[in-house]
Image: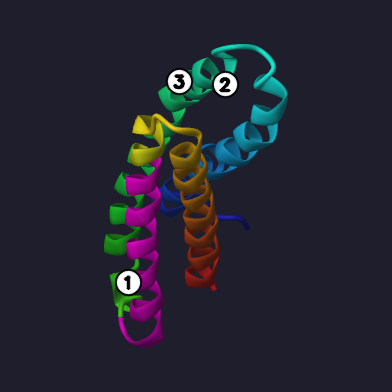
Amino acid sequence: MIEFGWDTIRLFLHVVAATIWVGGQITLAALVPALRSMPDVPKRAAQQFNKIAWPAFGVLILTGIWNIIAERHKNHGSYAAVFGIKMVVVLISGVTAYLHGRATTRKGLAIFGSLTGISALAALFLGILLAD
């Protein structure tokens, strides 16, 4: 029989938030070249995305803390090492996303946007490693 409980809810919320944070960035990055032909549209699209992206990032942080508490018995050895690296990568993703939102040049937007996307994907990959 399939069990349903708080662990299921915790993981579901974490995965949905990660889908929005990571998947939304990939989708927006794919759309930006087409949107550039219309003035201010890429910026407006990014502003709209941020209305769901930052709350999703907050849910990721909260459910991540919940994950730490729920999985504290695993917090040793290689699990702890991968987890520590993941926390650094998550911090980088949040900071670079913040800096991307404040960038005023195309170069700044490109650099911080790329770093945000790469670090978000890396955090996702590390999270999958932790789930094994």
Query: With 105 as the anchor, is 80 left or right in this view?
Result: left
Marker disc for residue 84: 1
**Mark toward the start of the polypeptide (3 vs 2):** 2
Image coords of residue 46 (percent x, y): 50, 24
Q: Do the residues labelled 3 and 2 touch (CB within 8 Å)?
A: no
Q: Count the marks: how many?
A: 3
Judged from the image, the secondary structure of the residue bearing numbered disc 3 is helix
Indicate the amino acid at tag 1.
Gly
The C terminus, quarter of image: bottom right
Indicate the amino acid at tag 2.
Pro
Indicate the amino acid at tag 3.
Gln
Magenta region includes residue 14: no
Q: Which residue is drawn at 69% across and 17% down?
A: 37
Judged from the image, the secondary structure of the residue bearing numbered disc 2 is helix
Q: Which of 74 and 84 is in front in this view?
A: 84
Marker disc for residue 42: 2
The N terminus, quarter of image: bottom right
Please identify the dominant SS of the magenta region.
helix
> Gap between marks 1 and 2, in whole Å?
34 Å
Query: With 13 as the anchor, is 74 left or right in this view?
Result: left
Q: Which residue is drawn at 49% across and 43% down?
A: 113
- The range drawn in magenta is 76-97
The quadrant holding residue 84 is: bottom left
Marker disc for residue 47: 3
